[in-house]
């Protein structure tokens, strides 16, 4: 296997992992505030179609990203009204949002199914992209790939190094205590939910405008659910989310390279397809197997509704 | 006397009225699709067929379809619902609908059912399918002639005989004109996942394939080839639908399903009460499989050769699986001078010579 291969595998791994990272980090912040929003799949779908439509009409992929983000915020606002204001069950609200979002995206997207979008030129980082092997793989990527890296650092810094992050985590641990010392639990949870929605929308935009520049119903194909489970298996740690997402992407790409090499290794195709899931779960379970860290990291009030005056 | 006359008159009137009603009332024909109709792909082709049939039998039929019906328990409920709603002819267009269709057909003996791609039929259940492999073989010939790297990449959904048959036919077509040709296969284990399909295509292109085709349901593979065409000289063959609009430069040809004529013919048989069961496996001869128009990048003499071979397939002179058919391990599956039987084709679970990848064991 030549260096070119390694470079292509790395490149494709990063691309495949990027939407997962962005969506999972958004969900991580939401869950850290104690809210379980299972609507990622639907939010991504609506984000994807909105981004595609705007990118198509304006010819500007950046506006597409903004549209995806806006659509994601709108979707999560629906979730917020249902789960935070009306205090409906979070699991049910999130599932409903997913089903609704997938359907809504199909409905909005009908006129765009036959439209092709020009692929967007990658952004080359000066100097860095000249590094052999790693340069072309890591530093000739789409803007959102770099965004995902910045996001990891930002989310980690926000949660563990800022007061606002501390408050957000407190809300997720014990909303009653946070409320009793004067923090607006519902307001903070709203912000976290909207952030999660915005990221899911951007993740969707990445799918439809950059990853496969097209819109078809069902194109998110379960990535929202994968992102959700990544958060849990990464025990709510941003860096582990990244490891999980790249591991997942990497296994998927690597198994394709094995298949496409034309070398005769007889492994059941179903096994190869299941491998990314199995490997990711296995590795994340192994690195997060310490029970007390799981308990430390998992938000204690996750999924519970909070009644401010109770 | 008077009352009896009146009664007779009313009766006659009622009979007249009801016959007039049945003559005027078109027959309801229902279709069940596994995916959304969309803009290209398996279901899209069936829907084109439905529209063509509806236009041709205007006044005689009305049609209705339900899209995106998952295979499994839900399918049975929806097929049953369709029969209860008064649809007299029902087409179920995915392999996984076979058992539910058979089950429902037994409870509705007056309704005629048709199932695509399956093997179970009954008194009121016909089956139909298309000989995709004929188009694949010709696509393979073009690929074999035009490939510079001698490597073709094939993005495939699931290792079932229908898909394997297409891969083998493509490989045989390619090999028939290019002894150095090899076909590499990536299984994505999904009929529809544009992201994965695209990754698979990109992987094959990165590993030297300059001819790309797919047996999945989106246009992602053709689009990937279009994107890489300038840099790598990648060409594509579409499947199910003509995808030239997604690969205006890269698409050389493709294998296209055409169901309309079949639907018209079959429904006429049922309407005329001449239907005696259907077990149709139609190919180029029946017009159920067509080549997507060859692009101008295919050299004129090659185009001529393909047209000639197409004629030979139609007359039966050329069979993509004419012996000797030798599998990857060197075992002879069909002896020289014979053609592979339909049942053997439908049970194909090995690769022929020319496919480089290993067959996925189950």
Image (cartoon, coloured by chain):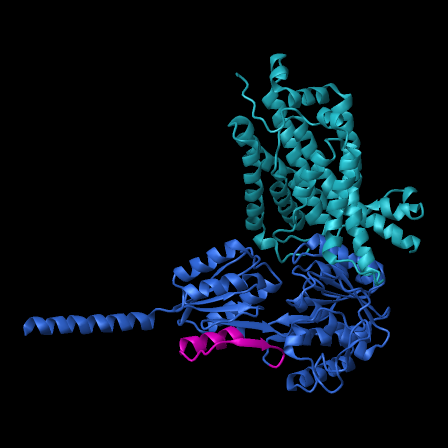
Chain colours: A cyan, B blue
Magenta range: B262-285
Q: Quadrant of the C terminus of chain B?
A: bottom right
Judge whether residue B80 can be spotted in this image.
yes
Give how far across and how far down residue A82 sits, in percent: 53, 31
Of residues B104 and B213, the one nearer the viewer is B104
Judge whether residue B292 can be spotted in this image.
no
Q: Quadrant of the N terminus of chain B?
A: bottom left
Q: How many discs mark residues in the rendered view?
A: 0
Q: Is residue B15 left or right of residue B45?
A: left
Is residue B279 located in the magenta-colored stretch of the structure?
A: yes
Q: Is residue B75 left or right of residue B136?
A: left
Quarter of the figure with residue B17: bottom left
Determine the residue positioned at 58% across, 54% down.
A111
In the image, farthest residue toward the left: B1
Quarter of the figure with residue A177: top right
Give how far across and how far down residue B342 sits, in percent: 64, 77
Is residue A97 located in the magenta-colored stretch of the structure?
A: no
Give how far across and how far down residue A290 sits, in percent: 77, 29
Q: Is residue B151 above or below residue A59?
A: below
Q: Is residue B278 above or below residue A217?
A: below
Give how far across and how far down residue A37 sits, in percent: 61, 34
Q: Is residue A269 above or below residue B90?
A: above
Quarter of the figure with residue B207: bottom right
Q: Is residue A14 above or below residue B32?
A: above
């Amino acid at each position: 296997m030549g260096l070119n291969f390694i470079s292509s595998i790395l490149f494709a791994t990063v691309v495949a992992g990027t939407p997962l990272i962005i969506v999972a980090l958004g969900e991580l912040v939401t869950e850290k505030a104690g809210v379980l929003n299972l609507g990622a799949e639907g939010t991504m779908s609506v984000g994807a179609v909105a981004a595609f439509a705007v990118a198509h009409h304006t010819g500007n992929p950046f506006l597409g990203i903004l549209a995806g983000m806006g659509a994601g915020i709108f979707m999560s606002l629906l979730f917020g009204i249902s789960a935070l204001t009306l205090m409906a069950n979070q699991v049910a609200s999130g599932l409903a949002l997913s089903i609704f979002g997938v359907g809504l995206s199909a409905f909005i997207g009908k006129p765009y199914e036959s439209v092709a979008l020009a692929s967007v030129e990658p952004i080359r980082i000066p100097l860095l992209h000249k590094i052999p092997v790693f340069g072309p793989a890591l530093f000739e990527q789409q803007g959102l790939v770099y965004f995902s890296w910045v996001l990891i650092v930002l989310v980690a810094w926000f949660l563990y190094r800022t007061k606002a992050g501390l408050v957000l985590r407190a809300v997720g641990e014990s909303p009653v205590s946070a409320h009793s010392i004067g923090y607006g639990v519902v307001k903070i949870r709203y912000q976290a939910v909207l952030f999660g929605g915005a990221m899911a929308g951007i993740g969707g935009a990445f799918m439809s405008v950059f990853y496969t520049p097209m819109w078809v119903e069902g194109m998110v194909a379960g990535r929202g659910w994968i992102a959700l489970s990544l958060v849990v298996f990464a025990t709510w740690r941003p860096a582990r989310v990244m490891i999980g997402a790249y591991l997942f992407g990497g296994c998927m790409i690597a198994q394709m390279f094995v298949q496409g090499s034309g070398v005769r290794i007889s492994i059941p195709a179903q096994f190869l397809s299941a491998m990314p899931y199995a490997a990711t779960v296995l590795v994340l379970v192994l690195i997060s197997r310490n029970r007390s860290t799981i308990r430390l990291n998992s938000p204690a009030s996750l999924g519970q509704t909070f009644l401010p005056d109770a | 006397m008077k009352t009896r006359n009146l009664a007779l008159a009313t009766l006659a009137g009622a009979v007249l009225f009801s016959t007039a009603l049945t003559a005027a009332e078109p027959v309801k024909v229902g279709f069940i699709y596994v995916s959304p109709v969309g803009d290209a792909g398996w279901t899209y082709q069936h829907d084109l067929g439905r529209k063509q049939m509806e236009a041709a039998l205007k006044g005689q039929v009305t049609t209705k379809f339900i899209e995106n019906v998952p295979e499994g328990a839900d399918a049975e409920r929806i097929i049953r619902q369709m029969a209860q709603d008064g649809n007299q002819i029902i087409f179920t267009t995915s392999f996984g609908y076979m058992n539910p269709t058979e089950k429902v057909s037994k409870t509705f003996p007056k309704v005629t059912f048709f199932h695509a791609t399956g093997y179970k039929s009954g008194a009121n259940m016909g089956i139909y399918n298309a000989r995709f492999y004929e188009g694949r073989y010709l696509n393979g010939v073009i690929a074999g002639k035009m490939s510079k790297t001698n490597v073709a990449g094939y993005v495939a959904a699931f290792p079932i005989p229908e898909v394997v048959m297409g891969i083998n036919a493509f490989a045989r077509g390619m090999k028939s004109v290019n002894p150095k040709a090899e076909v590499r296969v990536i299984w994505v284990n999904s009929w529809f996942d544009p992201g994965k399909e695209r990754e698979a295509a990109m992987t094959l292109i990165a590993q030297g394939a300059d001819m790309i085709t797919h047996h999945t349901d989106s246009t992602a593979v053709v689009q990937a080839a279009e994107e890489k065409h300038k840099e790598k000289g990648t060409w594509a063959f579409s499947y199910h639908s003509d995808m030239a609009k997604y690969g205006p430069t890269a698409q050389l040809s493709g294998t296209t399903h055409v169901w309309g004529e079949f639907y018209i013919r079959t429904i006429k048989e049922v309407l005329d009460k001449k239907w005696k069961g259907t077990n149709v496996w139609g190919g180029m001869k029946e017009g159920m499989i067509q080549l997507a128009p060859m692009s101008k990048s295919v050299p004129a003499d090659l185009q001529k050769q393909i047209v000639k071979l197409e004629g030979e397939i139609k007359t039966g002179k050329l069979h993509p699986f004419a012996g000797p058919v030798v599998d990857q391990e060197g075992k002879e599956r069909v002896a020289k001078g014979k053609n592979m039987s339909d049942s053997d084709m439908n049970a194909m679970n090995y690769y022929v010579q020319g496919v480089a990848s290993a067959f996925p064991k189950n």
